[in-house]
Image (spheres, rainbow, N blue to C red):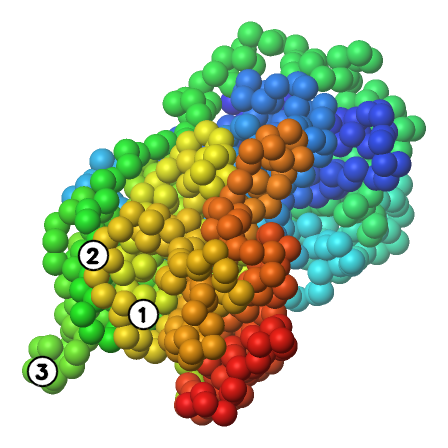
Amino acid sequence: MTQNTSHLRTMEQRLLWLSHWMIHNANHLRPKADGIKVGGHQASSASMVSIMTALYFSALRPEDRVAVKPHASPVFHAIQYLMGNMDRARMKNFRGLGGVQSYPSRTKDVDDVDFSTGSVGLGVAITSLASLVQDYITAKDWGTDVTQGRMVALVGDAELDEGNIYEALQEGWKNDLRNCWWIIDYNRQSLDGIVREGLFARIEKIFDAFGWDVVRVKYGALQRAAFDEPGGDALRDWIEACPNQEYSALTYQGGAGWRKRLMDDLGDQGTVTALLDARDDDALAALMENLGGNCVQTMAETFASIDHDRPVCFLAYTVKGWGTPIAGHKDNHGGLMTKAQMADWQTHMGVPEGQEWEPLATVTDKSAFQTFMDTAPFFANGPRRFSDAALPVPQIDIATDREISTQAAFGKILDDLAKGNSDLARRIMTTSPDVTGTTSLGPWVNRRKLFARAEKADAFIEHRIPSTAKWNFAPEGQHLEIGIAEMNLFLLLGAAGLSHSLFGKRVIPIGTVYDPFVHRGLDALNYACYQDARFMIVGTPSGVTLAPEGGAHQSIGTPLTGIAQDGLASFEPAFADELAVIMGWAFDYMQRDGDGDPDERTWLRDETGGSVYLRLTTAPLEQPGKRLDDAFRQGAVDGAYWLRKPGPNCDVVIAYQGAVAQEAIAAAGQLADARRDVGVLAITSADRLNAGWTAAQRARARGSMTARSHIETLLGDLPSTCSIVTVIDGHPATLGWLGSVAGHRAVSLGVEHFGQTGTIQDLYHHFGIDRMGILTAINGLTAGRPIDLRSVS
């Protein structure tokens, strides 16, 4: 055995102990405030120990990036603890406030997490999209100094039930994926049972069909040596034929159980009997549990054998709970060793009492082992969180002398950026799930091309067939084409939105999608925001304003998603100049990384930065003319401004968000005869208004009695008798809270049911969000001064 293999085995045992002791301490030794199980997945950690030891201390280099299987987080944190990147206090506080997280988190953990994991399947798939982003960056003249690494996912076998993994496989094949490893912990157990027989024979075919190399790692060094002994062929054949459930059950029974079963099945063959008799029960159990994924030597040799950049799927056979008293038991997924089991296991592991937390407690030659850790290539450069300078934002402007929709204005703004050569424009990467042309990205793509590692011409251009789209693929291209899979869209935006940290090169990712289908990718959107990825997502067209398309393409709840999603600033501008102001702000906001102290003007934590969601529409609106005043520009960013400022005797305010602006303005005009003092509040972001309001309330509760949010300032001078009608092409709850800000009577109009086909006016009237609906609502609020609705055209 080489010295390096010896150190790997020592490391393997150290990680096995520390990961399990951390979980045991949290569940059985640490005081419990709630009286409930803390949890921690000891068995799922144990099955990954050998794989992760070989990976981190033999195979990986600093440029590689790893998404750790969620349930193996204790092993990952134990690695960081041994390497000095994690303190003991946080380890002791596993799953506690301020301690290491249940699952690896880029934003909540202090150690060197590459990709957050937790929502199973997403951490797997993002590695393939991150590899595409790496290729995108290194193909550019500003990214040639990036050293390409492998994007690695440690995968629980049950995670392969997740459909988004297969969507990512297909996307990888279409984009010539490389430098991607998926290492499957094939322990054949999930939360509720045992993996079905024969399943992975089919899964292997799927990987093979999409161009992956599949490497089976089934037998460890002990087993391979035994197979070379007389009788070894019969033992190997028996293992090959043994059902998953049987193997797990026999593992739990231990050496005596293995011996009885093997003697019953094979003991009449003299060579096999001799092979078994040559080993006592402990040695026989060690042999039978020495599957490839539980043999650190085998895993290190397997990783080292890969000498190409093709994607590789390693199918590593393991025992769930390997090396522990709960190995193989059907219920061990959430199971924990008892105090008695842990005491016996501590003796077995040779850990002296009182030295449970000592990093090198069982290491005999501490100096040599420390040298081994100090020279591990992956950790050679220290923490691998990079940064990149913020890019200056050029002037974003647009003409407002004609009717235009916000979707068309978005396309025009990007086209104007494409015509220039600003640093920001060079770093923009657009993407869309097969709706590039219909979401107004076409002009940008025509000027900036599509990305591919090898140039591909547009056959329609070559044959001189007229087309508005010039789909030229080239390494310098700035649009990354993906298929109809919104999960891939948000995973790609998440990977690109972390490029400054992962690769040291900032990308400005912009994705477009039909607004209702934001919810198709909501899990991946949340996952991207949880990692603090920075991107712009444009949902367009939106609402019943997309009238002829019907309910399948009309969004209702996305404005509420915009409010609820942490890390995402949501806007729904009605006019092109609002969009221009917001996009100029957004490009800067996406690059911020400040301290998070609230701005007392709005009580928003804008210095932290984040991602941006624009909800746009295809309905062209008459524009309000050129507006240059600071109140408008600042209000558009802060979330609202007075389109028609109320006077001291105002008794009605119409507050709108988005494309229904024309109905709100028309209703206010209709009121001119009956009421001279009507306010019209243009809301560009219910999200930012609501966030500022709730933050200001919290500040006042903590003693900052002068705290006042933007919406409180806007509504603060309204008479108490004033009524508010809110209107939006979306769920009315989006603005339904406005009446609570200063205690005004309010009614909220919007869309609560699936739409249908028709004209915009038909559907606005059907849902009561047209001018008539607004005036009817006002009549209900101000019964003492009714409006003659018969005069409304």
Disc 2, SS: loop
Quarter placement of the N terminus: top right
Task: Specify the quadrant of the image occupied by residue 461.
Answer: bottom left
Task: Specify the quadrant of the image occupied by residue 746.
Answer: bottom right
Circle nearer the N terminus (3, 2)? 2
Horizontally, residue 165 falls left or right of residue 26, namely left
Residue 332 is labelled as none
Horizontally, residue 692 falls left or right of residue 49, namely left
Disc 3, SS: loop
Rendering coords of residue 291 (x, y %): 66, 44
Disc 1, SS: helix
Q: Residue furthest right?
A: 340
| Numbered label tally | 3
* Residue drawn at point x = 72 percent, y = 23 percent: 92
* Residue drawn at point x = 57 percent, y = 41 percent: 695
Q: Which residue is mark 3?
A: 463
Residue 6, compared with residue 75, is above or below; it is above
* Amino acid found under the numbered disc labelled 3: His
* Amino acid found under the numbered disc labelled 2: Asp
State if disc 1 and disc 2 touch (CB < 8 Å).
no
